[in-house]
Image (cartoon, helix red, strand yellow):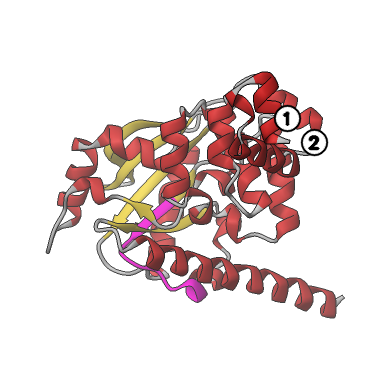
Amino acid sequence: MSRELTLEFGQAFSLRSLYRAIQFCQGFSNQEIVSTLSTQLSWSHFIELLPIKDPLARDFYAEMCRIERWDVRTLRLKIGGLLFERTALSKKPQAVIAAEIDRLRDGQMSPDTVFRDPYLLDLLGLKGAFSERDLEGAILREIEGVLLELGTGFAFVARQKRMSVGKDDFHLDLLFFHRHLRRLIAVELKLESFQPAHVGQMEFYLRWLDTHERAPGEGAPIGLILCASADAEQVELLELDAKSIRVGEYLTELPPLPLLRERLHRAIEHAREGAARRLSDAGSRE
């Protein structure tokens, strides 16, 4: 067929092109969705999406590419950087992921699509021993690259945000605003591994921001605790989603990509098994 079409219509019908066309029809079978995507994504975008085997991951990248208007190079970097696997969304049951992607198609973005773990901060150039102040300063020096890693929609608000309560002053490391979520994002940096005590500090900051900084029409602030490492079981036990708090690791030096991919897949499996277990326990109690 390729030979016959090439003779009649030219090189656009090479064997490789036909194979991609078949992949496209199999991967994007919903005509209504394709119609929407094709107004903003080029064929070159679709060529980057076609090799993704997980249909939910493929749909996620397609919708984020449409919403955030990524060029082909940015899309390639997001896929290569395992963006989907690093989102909180990837660790949810498949039915939840599908529902969230449907919400993305309707222009609604949730915290699960925004927050990542880990955050890749190798661009900061930090080596060896460094302090929290060093980390904070490096983030501000490289703010453009950091905002790219955080994701489209983040806007920097303040460093060492002062919070006066009674006779004492407290200082939040970094404060951002997310345009799509319409919520303030409080970020605390920790050089050590995550500790449950960090949660109480963040809850305090969020209550202050909710009382003194939240503008009309905005949602409640969200807290992000960025730490050197975190025990998944500890984080799961604390049920932080209900407190509007997220925990994420940061990597100032990237491990080999296969190692990072394996680690993320283990984390996804652990999270999904935990969600299934909680659902089963809830059913048993009923």
Assign the C terminus to one quadrant of the image.
bottom right
Q: Dot 1 lies on which element?
A: helix
Q: Which residue is mark 2?
A: 30
Residue 32: % across, % down: 80, 28
Q: Is 20 positioned to the left or the right of 262 in the image?
A: right
Q: Are marks 1 and 2 in contact (CB under 8 Å)?
A: yes
- Residue 102 picture quarter: top right
Q: Residues within 10 Å of mark 1 (few under 14, many from 20)?
A: some
Residue 124 in magenta? no
Disc 2, SS: loop
Residue 52 screen position, x and y as percent? 58, 50
Residue corresponding to mark 1: 34
Give whichever of 221, 164 is nearer the camera.
221
From the viewer's perspective, is residue 171 above or below residue 31?
A: below
Disc 1 to disc 2, how far (Cα)?
Answer: 6 Å
- For residue 10, side relative to residue 199 (left or right): right
**On screen, residue 242 above or below 73:** below
In magenta, the rendered stretch is: 224-234
Task: Say if residue 138 shows up in the picture.
Answer: yes
Query: Looking at the image, which residue is at 17% across and 49% down?
Result: 125
Q: Give the image location of residue 227, x and y in percent.
A: 33, 61
